[in-house]
Image (cartoon, rainbow, N blue to C red):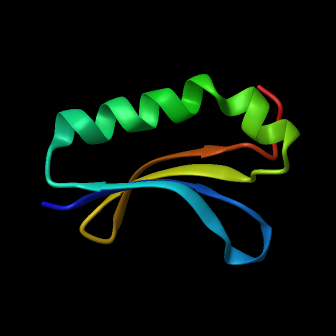
Amino acid sequence: MTYRIYVRWPNQKVTDKTTTDNEMVATLAYGQLNIAADRLRSEGAIGIVYSSDGKQIAYRDLTKEE
């Protein structure tokens, strides 16, 4: 399986992308981006994506306050 973790921005832009075959690395990368969620939100990010082989595993919507 290939895991992809990244931050979504307006206009289909993505950054902070991690692509790995290691689930532990993917989970760690997603966790680190979630720790930075408030900063990313303040910079205009709209979401954090965790997917595997084209299927979404988790998504954090940064357009909504938690």
Residue found farthest to the bottom: 11
The residue drawn where x is 67% and y is 71% is 13
Q: Is residue 61 above or below residue 10?
A: above
The residue drawn where x is 39% and y is 36% is 29
Where's residue 12, x and y in %? 68, 75
Q: Is residue 15 above or below residue 37?
A: below
The residue drawn where x is 73% and y is 62% is 9
> Based on the displayed image, in which of its 4 quarters is residue 56 positioned?
bottom left
Depth order, front residue of 27/17: 17
In this rendering, position of residue 53 left or right of residue 15: left
The quadrant of the picture occupied by the C terminus is top right
In this rendering, position of residue 4 left or right of residue 15: left
The residue drawn where x is 34% and y is 30% is 28
Where's residue 61, x and y in %? 68, 46
Depth order, front residue of 64/38: 38
> Based on the displayed image, in which of its 4 quarters is residue 1 positioned?
bottom left
| Tally of numbered discs | 0
In this rendering, position of residue 42 left or right of residue 9: right
Where's residue 60, x and y in %? 60, 42
> Based on the displayed image, in which of its 4 quarters is residue 15 positioned?
bottom right
